[in-house]
Amino acid sequence: MANVTHIAVVPSPGFSHLVPIVEFTKRLVEHHPNFHVTCIVPSLGSPPYSSKVYVKTLPSNMDFIFLPPINKEQLPQGAYPGTLIQLTITFSLPSIHEALKSLSCKSPLTALVVDVFAFQALHFAKEFNALSYVYFPGAAMVLSLFLHMPNLDEQVSGEYKDLTEPIELPGCVPLQGCDLPAPTQNRSSEAYKHFLERAKGMLIADGILINTFLEMESGAIRALEELGNDKIKIYSVGPITLKGPSNEVDDSNECLRWLDNKPPSSVLYVSFGSGGTLSQHQINELALGLELSGQMFLWVLRAPSDSVNAAYLEAANEEDPLQFLPDGFLERTKEQGLVVPSWAPQVQILSHKSVGGFLSHCGWNSILESVQEGVPLITWPLFAEQRMNAVMLTDGLKVALKPKVNEDGIVEKDEIAKVIKCLMKCEEGKGMRKRIRELKDSAVNAYKHGSSIQTLSQLASQWENLDGIFGK
């Protein structure tokens, strides 16, 4: 019987951070069953129900340790979500260390893989004679920004958003300063300080695993590989999303039944991810824009908030979201659209033959899911690195349209209707549909036979060979 190779994984708090890194390790053990993975899970407050249900669906050679939750009252109220995640990890470090110590006594660790927010735990790897890796759940372009951030911080004076010239990262489409991640928009803030700490802290890792694939970001990936050389290895292992039997939804789901009766590629899916929220004013404009477009739509609606990320780490607003729609909207659009409160089975919706477009907040998980199903996008970034992702989709890959925002930060109904019609009906939209379907084919190949599965196999072989080197 082959020796078991044991690795430990530390995700960040929140379901959307747990899934990408766990799906990576799930893929690892499916292809290399002699691996055993222990996931050490920090949480802010009690672990969400979605996380507890999710871990019960995973293979027997994956274990979970839910750490003692961090009390929300210990953290600053109203802080940026990235700051709350970072501080949760910081306060959880003693528990992470204790868990690793207990594991290493039972079975020596070959590698420690941590989410980017858990970079402080990388220091523990050397103590337990293990290699250390960062799992970067975003785009290669965003990773490139992280790795260039220390130099950028020294070279640029003032705020990035005030730069007159674009920022050019090797192998990437040029970026305006205002399109950099939200934490960088105020360099005197705690959020920026933590962002810079993460950028510097990743550099001690032996390798970085990126949830992307070569055909999608070839320029950025090649440039990162050259930047890393012998200092830090770069591994592209994507696209990795929550997709498969464990996530299947009953065909009787209202959304899917509604889609079954619609023509192919006729419906625009509208969703802002697991945490995005719109103001009441913007909800009104979006509703009227959808109506004005005349296009069929499926809209996952959350109750309004003046904070764009109100639902990211907090409990969902229990008010009925439908009550916040304009008067008479549901009646007027009952033949045109379906509005679903709070949640819908996104992967199944995107894979449905009736869906022809996706109005998205541009979270990386959603982008990869859209690429895997060949669905072009309308970009509506809200927070985090979503503006960077939107630039890549529109200016780089050319598989998305970007609506114009007015001087008050609102996308108006006429503009919304215009971009929807363009995506769903115009020649420009047809070209985007063709390009993203070609990208879909590349994603399937990378995942099943090509660059990503080969990279995963190489990484697994390296870890297996270390067992002999370390005498495990």
Image (spheres, rainbow, N blue to C red):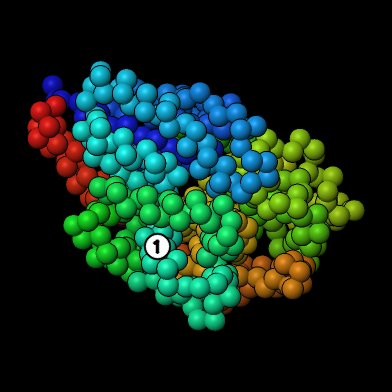
Residue 159 horizontal side relative to residue 147, left or right: right
Quarter of the image for residue 410 reads: bottom right
Residue at (73%, 73%) from the top-left corner?
A: 406
Quarter of the image for residue 152 reads: bottom left
Closest to the observer, 26 or 372: 26
Q: Is residue 324 visible?
A: yes
Residue 60 horizontal side relative to residue 341, left or right: left
Residue at (31%, 23%) from the top-left corner?
A: 101
> Which x, y percent locates residue 63?
37, 24
Q: Is residue 438 visible?
A: no
Closest to the observer, 443 or 91: 91
Q: Residues within 10 Å of mark 1 (few under 14, many from 20)?
A: some
> Which x, y percent locates residue 108?
21, 25
- Amino acid type, residue under disc 1 in the picture: Pro
Residue 206, placed above or below residue 428:
above
Residue at (21%, 29%) from the top-left corner?
A: 5
The residue furthest top is 106
Secondary structure beneath disc 1?
helix
Residue at (53%, 31%) from the top-left corner?
A: 43
Which residue lies under the disc numbered 1? 150
Residue 439, placed above or below residue 45:
below
